[in-house]
């Protein structure tokens, strides 16, 4: 039996102490780790109190650590004097921010979910509980009996409604929309037409504009050093940007560890298709300056509210584009996907059962075959979707344009709860999926039932069915669309088995995100980089490519293409057999140069023309050779401001 199970069955009093080798701010440690998060989650669910005083538990020389923890139950707390009572986890106001950070960022499916409003163990900021002002032990016992009775009522489902064993009629919402492409593609049946359907002029213009702006900022920061690659920068345009994106996509077809190797002339490499369209230095320059949003100067007083502002235009574009050109089928699935990232990042996540355990988490709404309808990037509890009720907030955000239309939404146990199912019923939307038995308002008969293999139990209330089925292990599920009927279902080996109808349909329609991850893994073109937003931006380009592939196979007239053939067809159009020479005017980009040295060997300095117009005296050693009269200008900010004013 596990430690948690032993404590639940042992009863009071309980003292749990030992060298857990765990770290958590809740338990006086200055840092945190996964083991500490699991330990504090378990202690909170068991209503244990932290007995650590804040002193180090291990000292060796000058190093001090807090890795040994002690927890006690309420029966021990009652016997201690007021000032020395241990503090109940989740109710110590001194650690409120740290606790919220741990609770709302523990997203592994293996952890108890304490972030959702449907959780039974919500963090309550009650300063009067277990205070030091009780007048007698009888008063303490009275309050604890009231709290215990309240928890018993919640577990029994006595919250204003009644769970019943008899089967009731489920809701029957008609699907009021039609699965269709919202733009006409009758005269456009080639793969490149579906690419330009998603990669439209607005998207390319955004990339060109932000890349050129960032390149200018980067050039001024470096100062035009002759050995710097950025010193040869020339502004990009739409045609070159499409070629650049095509070459990035092609790196997924021909996968090599180093970007420089694509331009090598060694007989083991020699991929002339890359050097024919773009030089190595130009490609690396574009990759260096590839940008999606204006930078914000951050300091202690100016901290952006949106942590994802560097990729926000791409997220908005993707979601708006899919909402404009396509309406999905009735069945939708919602789950999270991970983009590998092992660098330092405030909102980096760890999910144990994912292919990439460390990374940036994306919440995705997809069709069962893998077409992405909408997505959101998780950036921590300070986001609009973070904090208490996080899982429900994500669901309602991703479904915001699809509610009240009769959709059937499939989700796993991270999202599902009775409260969320009730909200979706009010918005004419079905939900089906697995369920965690520690969710609030789960019927006690379902939680406590002991089943043999193949047996099932279910309870109904207010149009919601919650059940449990014993297969190799207990599987709890919830549905507002299906009753607890047993139907024949085939597994991946073709073997038939009786399963509850909600489970059978969940297995059928819940594979959208996994299928999308699988397809992206065949020809990935994301690269290791120190800029997290660049990796997410390229991943979004890959998502747009995959969506165009799905739409092409679904709506074009003719045989379907494999992903490999589709990619080659697109690349053949974006990278023609005979590339056009690119003309870039030497005057298209103003590059500052130094005035040089005088006869005495000192650097020549002249008045800055822009500062002089503002009646300021400031000398500079830089000038613009491309402008008339070659004005002397300060490198920053006058050089940039002067050229922004020019027509």
Image (cartoon, rainbow, N blue to C red):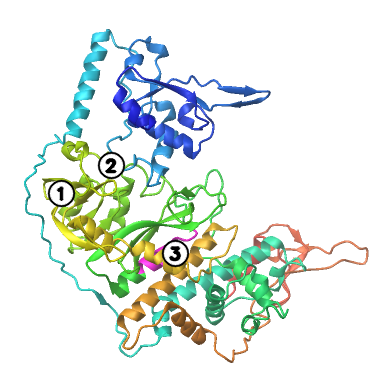
Question: Where's the C terminus, which quadrant?
Answer: bottom right
Residue found at x 54% / y 82%: 239
Residue 117's label in the rendered image is 2
Question: Can see residue 70?
Answer: no
Residue corresponding to mark 3: 313
Q: Which residue is at the far right?
A: 600
Rendered image quadrant of residue 113:
top left
Give x and y (percent) for residue 364: 36, 60
Q: Looking at this view, is 421 or 357 the one in front?
A: 357
Residue found at x 24% / y 14%: 141
Report, in whole angstroms, how far the alpha carbon at label 1 lies from the one at label 3: 40 Å
Q: Secondary structure at mark 1?
A: strand
Residue 465's label in the rendered image is 1
Give x and y (percent) for residue 458: 15, 46
Report the span colored magenta.
310-320
Lower position in the chain sequence, tag 1 or tag 2: 2
Question: Where's the N terminus, which quadrant?
Answer: top left
Q: Secondary structure at mark 3?
A: helix
């Amino acid at each position: 039996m596990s430690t948690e199970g032993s404590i639940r069955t042992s009863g009071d009093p309980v003292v749990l102490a030992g060298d857990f080798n765990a770290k958590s701010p809740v338990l006086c440690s200055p840092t945190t780790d996964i083991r500490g998060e699991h330990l504090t989650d378990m202690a909170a669910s068991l209503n244990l109190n932290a007995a650590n005083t804040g002193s180090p538990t291990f000292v060796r020389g000058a190093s001090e650590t807090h890795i040994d923890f002690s927890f006690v139950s309420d029966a021990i707390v009652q016997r201690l004097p007021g000032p020395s009572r241990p503090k109940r986890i989740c109710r110590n106001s001194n650690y409120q921010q740290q606790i919220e950070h741990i609770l709302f960022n523990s997203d592994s499916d293996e952890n108890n979910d304490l972030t959702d409003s449907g959780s039974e163990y919500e963090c309550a900021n009650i300063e009067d509980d277990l205070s030091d002002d009780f007048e007698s032990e009888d008063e303490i016992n009275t309050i604890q009996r009231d709290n215990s009775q309240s928890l018993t009522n919640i577990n029994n489902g006595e919250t204003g409604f009644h769970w019943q064993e008899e089967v009731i009629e489920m809701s029957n919402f008609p699907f009021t929309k039609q699965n269709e492409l919202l733009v006409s593609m009758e005269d456009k049946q080639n793969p490149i037409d579906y690419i330009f359907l998603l990669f439209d002029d607005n998207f390319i213009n955004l990339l060109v504009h932000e890349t050129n702006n960032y390149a200018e900022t980067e050039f001024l920061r470096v100062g035009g050093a002759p050995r710097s690659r950025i010193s040869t920068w020339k502004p990009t345009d739409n045609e070159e940007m499409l070629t650049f994106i095509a070459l990035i996509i092609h790196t997924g077809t021909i996968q090599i560890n180093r970007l420089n190797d694509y331009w090598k002339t060694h007989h083991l490499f020699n991929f002339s298709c890359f050097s024919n369209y773009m030089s190595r230095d130009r490609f690396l320059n574009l990759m260096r300056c590839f940008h999606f949003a204006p930078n914000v100067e951050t300091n202690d007083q100016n901290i952006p509210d949106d942590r994802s502002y560097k990729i926000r235009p791409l997220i908005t574009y993707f979601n708006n584009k899919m909402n404009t050109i396509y309406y999905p089928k009735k069945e939708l699935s919602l789950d999270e996907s991970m983009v590998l990232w092992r660098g330092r990042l405030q909102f980096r996540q760890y999910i144990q059962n994912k292919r990439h355990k460390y990374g940036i988490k994306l919440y995705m709404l997809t069709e069962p075959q893998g077409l992405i309808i909408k997505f959101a990037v998780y950036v921590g509890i300070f986001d609009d979707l973070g904090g208490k009720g996080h899982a429900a907030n994500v669901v309602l955000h991703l479904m915001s344009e699809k509610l009240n239309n009769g959709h059937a939404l499939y989700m796993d146990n991270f999202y599902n709860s009775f409260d969320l199912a009730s909200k979706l019923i009010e918005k004419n939307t079905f939900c089906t999926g697995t369920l965690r038995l520690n969710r609030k308002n789960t019927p006690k008969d379902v939680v406590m039932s002991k089943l043999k293999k193949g047996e099932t139990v279910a309870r109904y209330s207010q149009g919601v069915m919650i059940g449990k089925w014993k297969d190799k292990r207990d599987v709890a599920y919830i549905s507002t669309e299906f009753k607890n009927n047993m139907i024949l279902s085939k597994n991946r080996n073709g073997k038939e088995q009786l399963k509850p109808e909600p489970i059978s349909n969940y297995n059928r329609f819940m594979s959208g995100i996994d299928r999308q991850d699988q397809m992206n893994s065949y020809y990935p073109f994301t690269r290791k980089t120190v800029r997290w937003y660049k990796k997410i931006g390229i991943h979004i380009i890959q998502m747009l490519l995959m969506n165009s592939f799905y739409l092409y196979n679904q709506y074009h007239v003719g045989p379907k293409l494999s992903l490999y053939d589709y990619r080659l067809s697109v690349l053949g159009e974006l990278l023609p057999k005979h590339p056009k020479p690119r003309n870039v005017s030497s005057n298209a980009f103003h590059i500052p140069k130094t005035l040089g040295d005088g006869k005495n060997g000192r650097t020549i300095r002249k008045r800055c023309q822009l500062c002089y117009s503002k009646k300021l005296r400031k000398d500079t050693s830089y000038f613009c050779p491309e402008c008339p009269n070659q004005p002397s200008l300060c490198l920053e900010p006058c050089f940039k401001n002067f050229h922004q004013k020019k027509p």
